[in-house]
Amino acid sequence: MEIRALRAFVEVVRQGGFSRAAKTVFATQSTVSKAVKQLEEELGLQLLERIGHRSRLTEAGGIVYRRAATILAQGEDLRSELEELRGLKGGVLRLGFPLIGSNTLFARWFATYRSRYPGVDIRLFEHGSKRLEELLLAGELDLAASLLPVGGEFEWQEVRREPIDALLAADHPLAEHATLPFEALADMPFILYGPGFVLNSIIMEACRESGFTPKVAAHSSQVDFIIELVAAKLGIALLPRMIIEQRPHPLTRRVAVERPEIFWHMALVWRRGGYLSHAAQAWLALAGTPEVAGECAAP
């Protein structure tokens, strides 16, 4: 069983198809298809059910995918340990940041790290929290910033816990309230985040606890665009308080929500039991230092 075939199969599953997987592994689509076919023949089981241009895992495919992902991650750990032993990897740090809030939480942290360790090559990846967690499990990242809670396969270090507030158009009848119960938002259209954002599940759970399913007016992964949609009276949005305060808009108002009160709880996350390089340990050690403490402290 070749590592190359396992990697091709895992990427087909992660990327949702052969053509996108081929780009990820820098191979042709036919090469990826042949590798997966050879893996199926070697195992004597069908791993993927082809439906038009799409593929989905069979029961056997699900088992092989989980095992293959673990094998590949362990291979990355092996390379990391050996390279650092030879002094080749000590200068590389692979960081994953979410699309929302990273500029506030990590810009100063990044600058401090760069000044202390100028020889480290920092490689940044920006995705939603769910995708970052997948990359951690695959061994493709050393650390990622993600919203809590996370699964038991991860260890984490808290960065910041920030209230999530409602953002309303300035002339909305409820915009003059200091606080609102969550159920007061039931009849308003919501502007939610794009796929892969854990914030969506936090918001939807609060809606369920309050006894309603929100009407969704739009989805976006861009904070500034979301704020402009609220200003244009398309709907309301729920954003971390610090992000709203950093982007004041004359046509919007921030209102705290309660019952339930919800939080944007950010942490640095890594794979439990995985190898944590010296470069990654140095990044974690910066938490609480004077250079970054003010930026990351809870309000």
Image: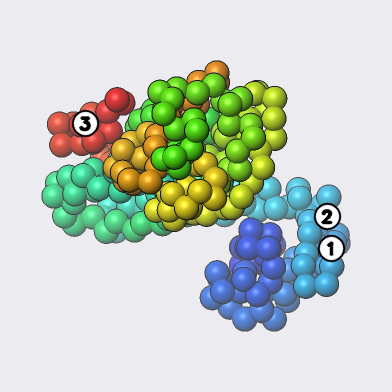
Q: Is residue 103 left or right of residue 16?
A: left
Q: Position of residue 188 (x, y in %)?
A: 60, 38
Q: Is residue 86 visible?
A: no
Residue 6 in which image quadrant: bottom right
The kind of residue tagged 3 is Ala
Q: Is residue 46 left or right of residue 120?
A: right
Q: CA distance from mark 1 to mark 3?
A: 51 Å
**Residue at 50% over, 41% down:** 237
Residue 118 in which image quadrant: bottom left
**Residue at 19% over, 49% down:** 111
Out of 183 and 261, give the one closest to the viewer.
183
The residue tagged 3 is 293
Q: Secondary structure at mark 2?
A: loop
The kind of residue tagged 2 is Thr
The circle drawn on residue 58 is: 2
Q: CA distance from mark 1 to mark 2?
A: 6 Å
Using a 10 Å C-alpha cutoff, classify the residue at mark 3 as few (fewer than 14 neighbours), some (14 to 19) or many (20 or more): some
Quadrant placement of the N terminus: bottom right
Q: Secondary structure at mark 3?
A: helix
Select label 1 or label 3 by which is in front: 3
Note whether 199 is above or below 4 in the view shown. above
Earlier-in-chain disc, 1 versus 2: 1
Q: Is residue 120 left or right of residue 18?
A: left
Note whether 35 is above or below 158 in the view shown. below
Using a 10 Å C-alpha cutoff, classify the residue at mark 2 as few (fewer than 14 neighbours), some (14 to 19) or many (20 or more): some
**Residue at 66% over, 42% down:** 215
The residue tagged 1 is 49
Note whether 135 is above or below 207 in the view shown. below
**Do the numbered discs 1 and 2 sit on residues whose CB atoms are within 8 Å?**
yes
Earlier-in-chain disc, 2 versus 3: 2
Q: Position of residue 94 (x, y in %)?
A: 37, 53
